[in-house]
Amino acid sequence: MPRRKNYVFDAANLQYLQHRRRLSEKLIRFMVWFGVSVALTVIYAFIFHRIAGDPKEELLTQKIEELKLSYSLLERKIDYSSAVIADLRASDNSSYRAILDLEMIPEDISEGGSGGTFKFGDLSGYMNTDMMMSVRSKFEDLKTQTNIQYNSLTELTERADEWKKMWAHLPYIRPVEVNIRLGDGLKFREKHPVLGSPRWHFGQDFRCPVGTEVHATGDGTVYYAGNDNDGFGIKVVIDHGYGYRTIYGHLSECRVKRGDKVSRGDRIAISGNTGVSSGPHLHYQIDLFGEHVNPLWYFEDSLTEEEYYRMLDFLSRP
Ligand SMILES: [Zn+2]
């Protein structure tokens, strides 16, 4: 495209003359043109930014929204887990810990209680500080609650194992077959059947023919087997631990010796009529920390309500 030429009219000579611009004039024109272009660019950019927004900023805003959503989902999951743990705690307190005679976990301890959000100072000063602190605080509470439940479960398991072991050791069955008639129980006898004098009878007698098998009534260790001339004739004494000893008297034969480990139901002796006895029978006695307790309370099939509570009273003694 040919360069456009400028002309001026020369009135004196009545002719047009080509006008040549000076450099300074050209420079001024360029500066004006450049200034207007820059101004227009800025105006366009501003308008575009207002209408369309900055793409990078848009991306960051989107990411922040996604993070907020993630936080909110996380918070819901934490709330759900806390509710599950609260259910577990309720079962623990109302069932397992109660059954196994363990103290209840106090609510304020098991709730966790992170002590507020003030300790998460590293989260302060951000746009979403409150949201982050809330989630962090709930998460810390959840951690505490989980630890408490874990410890409780460990304690329950240990206590259950301990009780299972103790249960196996306690004298909870009859020493002879159940259809054999009971003789005298634990009571004060005005007149002993052989000695004739008044005295306490500290056990339960089972009238049974000589030769009847006698069973250990709980797990334990044979403490004595033989005859030490104390009136019981040939006898077996089993130490069950937990303060319990059982005595089986007037036997005709021992099937165990001192130190033997026995389990509930093991055949330990044959009944007889030795010692101070008015006829064939088994004298069965339960001592708890040296005190004589009524063996009838220990047979599940023959407990009255009153006997049951008396038994519980005995069991709860230190
Ligand atoms: Zn007796």
Image: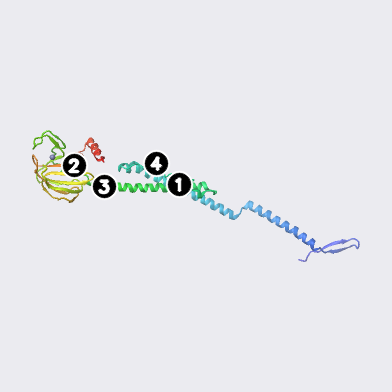
Residue at mark 1: 138
| Cα distance between the residues tagged 1 and 4 | 16 Å
Q: At x 66% / y 53%, what residue is drawn?
A: 46
Circle nearer the N terminus (4, 3): 4
Query: Please, what is the three-letter code of the amino acid marked with disc 4?
Result: Glu
- 103 left or right of 52 in image: left
User: Badge 1 local density, few (<14 within 10 Å), some, or many (20+)?
Assistant: many
Mark 2 or 1, which is nearer the eye?
Answer: 2
Query: Please, what is the three-letter code of the amino acid marked with disc 3?
Result: Lys
Residue at mark 3: 164
| Cα distance between the residues tagged 2 and 3 | 20 Å
Residue 47 position in % (x across, y down): 66, 52
Residue at mark 2: 286
Residue at mark 4: 107
User: Judging from the image, what secondary structure is the residue with disc 4 in?
Assistant: helix
Circle nearer the N terminus (2, 1): 1
Residue 19 position in % (x across, y down): 83, 63
Query: Please, what is the three-letter code of the amino acid marked with disc 1?
Result: Lys
